[in-house]
C-alpha cells in the first residue's frame, strides 16, 4: 500500500498542540495511487480492496466502489488529473494551487475550510475530474457496471447537399460519470450551513462543464475515401478544455450571501432543485449552474499565512518582462526580486538528414532566473 496514502488513511486529523485540525474531503488523497508504477499499483489496489477500511473514504463511498468494480482506479486518476490541472491553470498566479505531502486529511490544506473563490475552483475541478475519468473508463471497458454512452443509433437527416452520417461507435458514458461523481463526491458534504450549499453548487458546476464539453467525432466510410457516409459518436473534450472553462468561471465567480428563506437545504432537497443564491452585489445576476460561487474575500497571497498553510510568493520565479500575473511586479507584491545567472545545455543547430534523422549539437546557453524576495 502506498506510504503516503496509508498515512493519510490512518492519521485522522492528529494536529499538534495549539494547531487546528485540517478538514477536507479525504478521498483527494487517492491521487497518490496514480503516481506508482503499474505493477505496484495493481498490488496496492488489491490490498485496498482486501482491507477497504484502510481507504481514506467514508463508508458510503467504500460501498459505492464495491458495487462498481474498477472505479477505484478511475477515481484515483480523476483526482490526480484534477490536481495537475489546478496547478497548471494557476502556475502563473500568486496562489499556485499548492498541495501538501504530509499526510494531512486535506490535500490542499486549510484553504478548503474557507469560502474563497480558490476553494470553489478546487471543489469544481475535483468533481469534474471524477466525472471525466469514470466516463472515459466506461467507454474503454475498464468498468463492469457501465459501457458505452447511451446515444441513439440510427441515421440522422441532413440538409440537401450535406453528407449523411449516423450514430455508431462507442461514445463516452458521461451520464454514468456524472451520476457516479454526484454520489461519490457529494456524499462527504455534511451539515446544514451555507458552506454545504456552496460546495454542492461548485461540485455540480464542475460536472456541468464536463457534460457540456461533449464533442461529436466522426469517421468516413466509402469507396476510395469518398466519405459517402460517416459514423459519429460523442467524445469527452480534453480535460484541459474543462480546466480552461472552469478557470474562466473562477475569474468571473460570483460572491454570494446566505438567503433569508429559512432552511434552504431542506427546501432544496424537498423540491429537488438547486438553491438560488443571492449575489452580494445587487447589480450582478444570480449565478447559473455553470458559475462558481464563494462568500469569503480572498487574501492577496503575498505573504506567508500560517492559518491557511500558504508560504507566500517569496522564492517564486517570475517573468521580468511580463505585465501579467506572472510578472515580477505583481508576483513579488512590490517586494522586489533577485536575479541569478546560470548555464543551461540545450540542443542547437539541428539539421535534417535523409532519411529520416534530425541531428543536433549541444550548446551552452547563459540564462537569467528571477525570483521574488521573501
Image: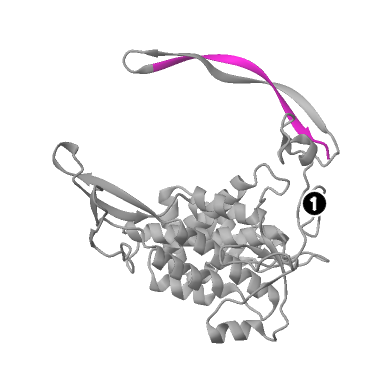
Decide which of 249, 17 is in the foreground and name it. Answer: 249
Image-based side of 63 in relation to 20, left or right: left
Going 32% across and 58% down the picture, which residue do you hit? 171
Q: Main secondary structure of the magenta part?
A: strand
Instruction: Relative to 157, say whether 323 is above or below.
Output: above
In this view, the residue farthest toward the front is 160
Instruction: Relative to 309, say whether 372 is above or below.
Output: above
Where residue 104 sits in the image (x, y, percent)? 66, 61
Going 44% across and 57% down the picture, which residue do you hit? 133
Where residue 314 sits in the image (x, y, percent)? 79, 41
Give the image quarter of residue 108: bottom right
Q: How is the image coloured?
A: one colour
In this view, the residue farthest toward the right is 335
Magenta region includes residue 369: yes
Residue 148 visible, this angle: yes
> In this picture, which residue range is highlighted in magenta?
358-374
Where residue 105 sits in the image (x, y, percent)? 65, 64
Going 80% across and 51% down the picture, which residue do you hit? 300
Instruction: Relative to 84, say whether 105 is above or below.
Output: below
Where residue 243 sits in the image (x, y, percent)? 55, 52
Residue 35 visible, this angle: no
Going 52% across and 72% down the picture, which residue do you hit? 53
The total of numbered circles placed on residues is 1
Mark 1 — residue? 300
Q: Secondary structure at mark 1?
A: loop
Amino acid at each position: 500500500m502506498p506510504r503516503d496514502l496509508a498515512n493519510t488513511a490512518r492519521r485522522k486529523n492528529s494536529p499538534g498542540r495549539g494547531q487546528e485540525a485540517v478538514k477536507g474531503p479525504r478521498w483527494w488523497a487517492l491521487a497518490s495511487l496514480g503516481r506508482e508504477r503499474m505493477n505496484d499499483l495493481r498490488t496496492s489496489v488489491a490490498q485496498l480492496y482486501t482491507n477497504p477500511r484502510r481507504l481514506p473514504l467514508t463508508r458510503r463511498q467504500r460501498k459505492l466502489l464495491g458495487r462498481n468494480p474498477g472505479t477505484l482506479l478511475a477515481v484515483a486518476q480523476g483526482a490526480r488529473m484534477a490536481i495537475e490541472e489546478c496547478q497548471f491553470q494557476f502556475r502563473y498566479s500568486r496562489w499556485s494551487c499548492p498541495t501538501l505531502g504530509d499526510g494531512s486529511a486535506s490535500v490542499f490544506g486549510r484553504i478548503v475550510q474557507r469560502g474563497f473563490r480558490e476553494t470553489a475552483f478546487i471543489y469544481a475541478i475535483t468533481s469534474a475530474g471524477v466525472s471525466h475519468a469514470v466516463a472515459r473508463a466506461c467507454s474503454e471497458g475498464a468498468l463492469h457496471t457501465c459501457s458505452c454512452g447511451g446515444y441513439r443509433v440510427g441515421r440522422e437527416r441532413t440538409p440537401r447537399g450535406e453528407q449523411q452520417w449516423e450514430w455508431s461507435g462507442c461514445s463516452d458514458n458521461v451520464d454514468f460519470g456524472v451520476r457516479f461523481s454526484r454520489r461519490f463526491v457529494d456524499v462527504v458534504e455534511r451539515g446544514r450551513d451555507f458552506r454545504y450549499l456552496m460546495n454542492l453548487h461548485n461540485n455540480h458546476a464542475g460536472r456541468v462543464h464536463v457534460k457540456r464539453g461533449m464533442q461529436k467525432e466522426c469517421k468516413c466510410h466509402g469507396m476510395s475515401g469518398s466519405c459517402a457516409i460517416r459514423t459519429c459518436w460523442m467524445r469527452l473534450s480534453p480535460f484541459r478544455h474543462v480546466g480552461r472553462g472552469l478557470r474562466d468561471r473562477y475569474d468571473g465567480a460570483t460572491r454570494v450571501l446566505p438567503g433569508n428563506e429559512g432552511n434552504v437545504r431542506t427546501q432544496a432537497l424537498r423540491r429537488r432543485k438547486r438553491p438560488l443564491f443571492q449575489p452580494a452585489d445587487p447589480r450582478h445576476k444570480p449565478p447559473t449552474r455553470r458559475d462558481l460561487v464563494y462568500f469569503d474575500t480572498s487574501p492577496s497571497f503575498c505573504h506567508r499565512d500560517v492559518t491557511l498553510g500558504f508560504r507566500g510568493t517569496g522564492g517564486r520565479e517570475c517573468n521580468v518582462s511580463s505585465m501579467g500575473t506572472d510578472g515580477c511586479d505583481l508576483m513579488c507584491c512590490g517586494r522586489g526580486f533577485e536575479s541569478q545567472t546560470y548555464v543551461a545545455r540545450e540542443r542547437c543547430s539541428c539539421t535534417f538528414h535523409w532519411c529520416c534523422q534530425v541531428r543536433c549539437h549541444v550548446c551552452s546557453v547563459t540564462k537569467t532566473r528571477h525570483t521574488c524576495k521573501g
